[in-house]
Image (spheres, helix red, strand yellow):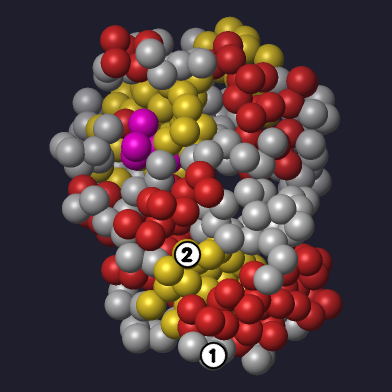
Amino acid sequence: MKALQFDRFGSPDVIALRDVPQPQPGPGQIRIAVRACGLTPADWHLVDGLLADHLPPLPRGLGLEIAGTVDALGEGVTDVRIGDRVFGPATFDGPTAGAAEYALMPAWAHIPAGVTTEQAAALPMAAETARRALDDLEVQSGELLLVHGAGSTVGEASVRLALHRGIRVIATAGHTRAAALKEIGAQVTAYGEGMAERIKALAGGHVDRALDTAPTGGRIDRADQPAPAGGSLPTLIELTGDPDRVLTVSDFAAAADLGVRITTEMRYDRMDEFARLADDGILVVPIARTYTLDQIQKAAKLSQSRRPGGKLVLVMLNCDHPAALAGKVT
C-alpha cells in the first residue's frame, strides 16, 4: 500500500510517499481503508522529534485523524462490521499512521449519513481538544467566555460547542472566519492594538473565563494575523481577573510562568457525541483545501504558514466522490 513515512526527524521535507506493508489490527483495534486524513500542527511536531523518546524507533508514519471504511477487525471488536464508515484517531506509533491507504484505529465512531468522510476526518482532534478545554475550564451555561484565536479549527470548534451549551461567547479572529463566527452567534472582534478595550466594550466589563486557542508564533500587531498565545495570556488574565479562569491549549511554557490552566490529555471517549453534533450541523470544522498523498509538501507549507483558512485534509484517490474532489485539490 501507499503511505507517508519518515525515517529521520526534521522539517516536513523528510516525509516521503512509499510502498509499505499493510498494518495488521491488534486486539481492540480496527483497520480501515482510509478515505481522508486530517492534518494538524501536531503532525509537524512529531516529524520534528516530539515524543521521540517515548515511541518505537523510526521509521514512522504521518497523520493522526482519519475517516474511511472498516476493512479488518482486531480480536474483541464487536461494535462495527466490515464496510462500515467510521472516523476517529489513527495509531501513530508504528511505521505507518493515518496518511496511508490503510490505517489502524484504537477508537472510532460511525459516520452519520449526512456527513462526508472529509468532514468526519476533520473532526477528531479539534472536537476533542475543544470539548476537553471547555470541561477543564469549567465554563457554565450563561457565563461569558472569551475564545481567543477562534479562527483556528480548535477555536471555532470551541465556539460552536460553547454556544451549544448555552454559554455566551466573545471571539477574537481575523477576517477570514469572522463572518462565519458572527453567523453562528458569537460576538467577534479582531486581534491587534486595542483588542482588550474592544472586548471590554462587548462584554460590558470583564469576561468570566477565557480560552486561548491561538497558534503560537503569530503576531499581535496586525489584525489579520493570529496573535501569539504567550503574548496574549497576560491580557486574558487582565480580562478575567484571575489566571485560574484562563486556559491555553498551546502555550504551556507561558502558562506555567503565569499560573494559567492547560489541558493535554486526549481521551476520545465522546466520539459518538461528536458524530451526532456533526450530523445536526452544530459541530463543523471548515475544510480549507484537500490534497492527495503526493502533495504533502504543499499541504505542509500552507499548514505551517499558520493561515490555512481552515482544515487541510489529505484524500485518497479512491475516495467517495473523486469527481467532486477533483476541483478542490490544489
What stretch of residues is rendered in magenta?
118-123
Query: Does 57 appear in magenta?
Result: no
> Left or right: where does residue 298 sit relative to residue 318?
right
Residue on which disc 1 sits? 205
| Mark carried by residue 235 | none
Residue closer to the observer: 58 or 295: 295
**Are the residues flagged by discs 1 and 2 in contact, CB closer than 8 Å?**
no
Relative height, residue 328 to residue 159 (above, below): above
Residue closer to the observer: 255 or 171: 171
Decide whether the magenta segment is chiefly helix, strand or loop: helix
> Left or right: where does residue 109 sit relative to residue 201?
left
Amino acid at circle 1: Gly
Badge 2: residue crowd in 10 Å (few <14, some 14–19, many ≥20): many
Q: Residue at x 38, y 13 (%)?
A: 327
Residue closer to the observer: 286 or 94: 286
Q: Residue 42, percent across and down?
A: 65, 44
Badge 1: residue crowd in 10 Å (few <14, some 14–19, many ≥20): few
Query: Does 119 appear in magenta?
Result: yes
Under tag 2, what secondary structure? strand
Residue on which disc 2 sits? 188
Q: Residue at x 34, y 39 (%)?
A: 120
